[in-house]
Image: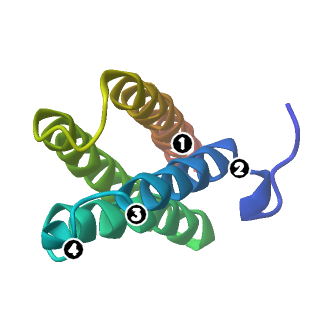
Amino acid sequence: MAKINRIEDLDAWQEARKLCQGIYLITNHFPKYELYNIMKHLRENGRGVPANIAEGFGRYFFKEKLRFYGIAKGCLEEMRNDIYLSYDSKYINKEIFNKFINQINKVCKQINGLISITLQFMKKH
């Protein structure tokens, strides 16, 4: 396993960034009347996932790390809800919907891994 020294070394953060980039790309095509509704909410949560992973990574105390990883998961689940809403509202097609749900699932597993590793370190220290 490679040593993780910087946030850029963290797979969860890298995948969350990709997810955020995708959110920005698809929301550019949403109707203008959604600018301050679903579009804004998706973008906020899109930024929130990698941002909270980064903040957790940068924290010194294990409980702080867990708190921010938990917030990242919350943002991710809100994003999942909004992707369903986007599909139901016909702003995205089934292919794009599936792509985002798969990426959300991938990032969720990676955040769960960060939480598990942090809990293991807490038990040792």
- Amino acid on which disc 3 is placed: Asn
- Determine crowd level at label 2: few under 14, some 14-19, many 20+ residues with C-alpha closer than 10 A: some
Going 54% across and 50% down the picture, which residue do you hit?
16
Q: CA distance from mark 1 to mark 3?
A: 31 Å
Q: Nearer the viewer, residue 1 or 81?
A: 81
Q: Which residue does the numbered mark 3 point to in the structure image?
A: 28
- Amino acid on which disc 2 is placed: Leu
Tag on residue 35?
4
Q: CB under 8 Å between callouts 2 and 1?
A: yes
**Figure quadrant of the N terminus:** top right
Label 4 vs label 1, nearer the camera: 4
Q: Which residue does the numbered mark 2 point to in the structure image?
A: 10
Q: CA distance from mark 4 to mark 3?
A: 9 Å
Q: Name which of mark 2 and mark 4 comes first in the sequence.
A: 2
Going 77% across and 59% down the picture, which residue do you hit?
8
Question: Viewed as shown, does residue 38 lie left or right of 104?
Answer: left
Question: Viewed as shown, does residue 86 lie left or right of 4?
Answer: left
Q: Which residue does the numbered mark 1 point to in the structure image?
A: 114
SS state under label 1: helix
Q: Nearer the viewer, residue 84 or 78?
A: 84
SS state under label 4: loop
- Determine crowd level at label 4: few under 14, some 14-19, many 20+ residues with C-alpha closer than 10 A: few
Label 1 vs label 3, nearer the camera: 3
